[in-house]
Amino acid sequence: MFQLNDFPLPFRETDLVPYMSVETVQFHYGKHLATYIANLNKLIADTKYADMDLREIIINSARDENAQKIFNNAAQIFNHEFFFNCLGRGGNTMVPDLISDAFGGAAEFKEKFKSVAGDVFGSGWVWLTYDNDKFEIIATKNADTPIAHGKRPVLALDLWEHAYYLDYQNRRSDFVDAFLDSLIDWNFVVSNLDV
Ligand code: MN
């Protein structure tokens, strides 16, 4: 059984204002993530997935055509924990050199990230991944997640409407800008390079 407490927020609900409202955090964490957890618990009860950790559930259900719902809910739990861990307002808004250098500059990194985000149609995620000493910015659709494809995520952006609609309505690109300029905890991002 998974519980919401297993995935604590690394910030207080008020910490992300004005870039992300308390209401958005409360719904996103307390309703959306909580529902994925409740759904997964029901779906895996009395199945081979019941004794697996979250990553094992994702890897195995991705290859199981009868486990699409299990995959969707498990991957969304992973994606949300990862996304929330990427958020914070520690005051460090600088793109780390290792990342900016890989894209020819901080502005170039942000432009590339925004371009990939702009191409997402419908619900999905944008990721910075790091494999074989190379960074890549990719999008995944719906619940899909880099770890199902053997890729290592280091930064995640939730582009489902529930992630931004209360605060930005149809202005999704403003949300992407706020994320890149003001919401990322780069210390967490960098910590993923060593895993
Ligand atoms: Mn979400």
Image: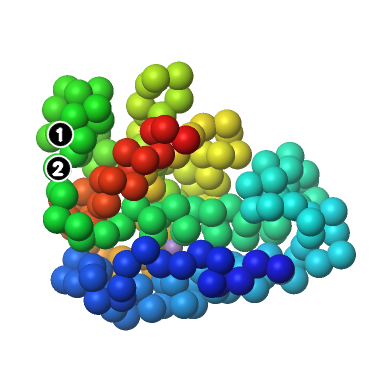
Ligand 1 position by quadrant: bottom left
Q: Left or right? Give the position of 22 relative to 132.
A: left
In percent of width and height, residue 155 lies at 36, 44
In percent of width and height, residue 13 lies at 31, 75
Whether 17 is drawn above or below 70: the answer is below
Which residue does the numbered mark 2 point to in the structure image? Answer: 94
- Graded by Cα atoms within 10 Å as few (under 14), some (14 to 19) or many (20 or more), the crowding at tag 1 reads some
Disc assigned to residue 106: 1
Element assignment for label 2: loop
Question: Which of the two residues, 89 or 42, is positioned nearer the viewer here?
Answer: 89
**How many labels sit on residues?**
2
Q: Is mark 2 within 8 Å of ligand 1?
A: no
Residue 36 appearing in the image:
yes
**Kind of residue at disc 2:** Met
Q: Left or right? Give the position of 29 relative to 106.
A: right
Whether 179 is drawn above or below 46: the answer is above
Q: Circles 2 and 1: CB distance less than 8 Å?
A: yes
Q: Residue at image x 41%, y 77%?
A: 27
Element assignment for label 1: helix
Real-space Cα distance between discs 2 and 1?
Answer: 8 Å
